[in-house]
Image (cartoon, rainbow, N blue to C red):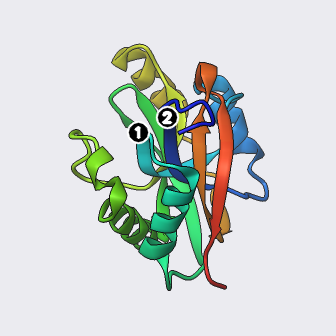
Amino acid sequence: MDSNGNVLKRTIMIMLDLEGGHSMQKLREAYDPLVEKVAPHITLVFPFESDMSKFEIEKDIQLSLSGIRQFPIVIKDIERQDCWLFLKVAEGKESLFDIHQKLYGGKFKQYKPLWLQDYCPHVTVGHFDSISEAKEAYEKELNFKDVFQCVVKQVTVEIIGEDEKSIIESRYELEA
C-alpha cells in the first residue's frame, strides 16, 4: 500500500547484472515492448495487487529465503511460447525454482496466478500481438547462440507503476 492507502501492483524478481549483455538488450529492443520500462530480469512472483506494506513483504521474503546463498546462473537458448520469446535458464534453474516455491509457500500463495502450473525460469526478450508474429521472430532468431552468466546475489521487489514503469521498492541480499 502506498502512502495514500492505494493498492499497489508488484512483482518479485531477480534483476540481472550481466557482463556482455548487449546482444540480449538488442533482442529486447527489437521485440520487447517493456524494454525501456524494466531491466532484464527473471520473475519469481508474478505481478500481483495487494495492500501489503513494504515491511510485510520484506519480512516474508526474509523468512522465506533465510539460508539461501548466492548462486551462479547461465542463460542461453531462445524459445517461443505462444506470443512470447524467452531466453532459458540453463544452469541455476533449480535454485530459482526453489526460491519461487518458497516465496509462493508464504504470504504470496494467495497471489499465485491460476495459469501458473509449471514454473520455468526465463528472461523475456519479446512479446507479440499474435502467435504468427512470435513465430516469425523466433525463426529469425534461431541462430542466436549467445550465452550469459551472472551470480544471483539479491531478490528485488518492484512496484509496477503507471504505464508499466518499473520502480524498485526494496532488495533482499542473499547470503554470500
Q: Residue 9, labelled with which disc? A: 2
The residue drawn where x is 62% and y is 21% is 162
Q: Three-letter amino acid code at disc 1? A: Phe
Q: Position of residue 53 (x, y in %)?
A: 52, 49
Closer to the chain start, of discs 2 and 1, is 2
Disc 2 secondary structure class: strand
Q: Is residue 63 visible?
A: yes
The residue drawn where x is 29% and y is 65% is 105
Q: Are marks 2 and 1 in contact (CB under 8 Å)?
A: yes
**On screen, 51 above or below 122?**
above
Q: Nearer the viewer, residue 54 or 39?
A: 54
Q: Is residue 39 visible?
A: no
Q: Is residue 163 left or right of residue 118?
A: right
Considering the image in quadrants, where does the C terminus appear?
bottom right
Q: Nearer the viewer, residue 110 or 93?
A: 110
As drawn, the residue found furthest toward the front would be: 4
Q: Position of residue 8 (x, y in %)?
A: 51, 35
Q: Nearer the viewer, residue 102 or 33?
A: 102
Disc 1 secondary structure class: strand
Q: Residue 48, labelled with which disc? A: 1
**On screen, 93 above or below 118?**
below
